[in-house]
Amino acid sequence: MGVTDPRDLPFQPVDLPHDWLIHNTLDLYENSIGWYRREWEFRGDADQVLLYFEGVYMDSTLYVNGQKVGEWKYGYSSFEHDLTPALQLGKNEILLKVVHQSPNSRWYSGAGIYRNVWLKKRGKNHIVTDGVYISTKRTDDGWQLLVDTELSLAEESQLTHTLIEIGGMALSRLLVTAFTIVRGRIMVAVGARLGQDLRSMTFGRLQALSLSFINQHRTGDLMNRINRDTDHVQSFCSTKCPM
């Protein structure tokens, strides 16, 4: 199954995404273990630091400075781990152990970090990962929209939803204030604006949704047109990653 202790391994640079099985075409279903290593400097500029993996095949375990921070046992879904408790100011060693065992799939699966990896920094008040839920319903006059947003709060914060029509004009601005919840989560359902129930409001050519999250320390857009988070997400190991 391969080496279980990476300390004496001869690491070499690789590009991500990466598949180590493809290098041995005579045995594309070999049982094996791969290790990925990266040194990263933490400057204390975030309350929480996470690694988000778009895909690792197949079973993986993440270590930070020798401490196990999490594992994931399925190769076909994305996942993230919170690095914060194991981080130290200055240089940190991040190790990912990946175990590949056959048989496991009908088709060739590959082995390793086969999708992008993202380093995420956020404050103690934030929108939970994948925490925006949108439902729509077609009506005779247009569309009805309901937005739920899952927040993790430690102090009073303000969440704003803005609907943007084709052409860039703000169609509607829905303001919700969420009050202090220490070490907890809250689900905010946008259901009212100017005394009207959102379920009874209709919208025409809806193009995008923008969210802003504000607290007493930080102000800024957390999501720009539903799927871009360039201000708060940095790429991790996108070019060369020692393995």
Image (spheres, rainbow, N blue to C red):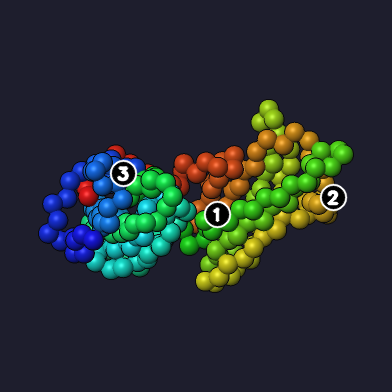
- Which mark, by number, is residue 69? none
- Which mark, by number, is residue 130? 1
User: What x and y, as percent, mark residue 154?
Assistant: 53, 67
Amino acid type shown at disc 1: Asp
Q: Residue at x 34, y 47 (%)?
A: 110
Camera-side mark, 3 or 1: 3
Figure quadrant of residue 191: bottom right
- 172 or 22: which is nearer to us? 22
Q: Earlier in the sequence, mark 3 or mark 1?
A: 3
Q: Residues within 10 Å of mark 3 (few under 14, many from 20)?
A: some
Mark 2 → mark 3, Cα distance in angstroms: 49 Å
Amino acid type shown at disc 2: Ser
| 127 up-or-down from 232: above or below | below
Figure quadrant of residue 101: bottom left
The secondary structure type at the circle numbered 3 is: loop
Camera-side mark, 2 or 3: 3
Q: Earlier in the sequence, mark 2 or mark 3?
A: 3
- Which mark, by number, is residue 200? 2
Disc 3 and disc 1 in contact, CB within 8 angstroms: no
Disc 2 and disc 3 in contact, CB within 8 angstroms: no
- Would you say residue 234 is visible in this rendering? no
Figure quadrant of residue 82: bottom left
- 172 or 57: which is nearer to us? 57
Left or right, 173 with respect to 195, comes to left
Q: Quickly name the residue at label 3.
A: 18
User: What x and y, as percent, mark residue 83?
Assistant: 36, 62
Left or right, 208 with respect to 94, comes to right
Mark 1 → mark 2, Cα distance in angstroms: 26 Å
Q: Residue at x 34, y 42 (%)?
A: 17
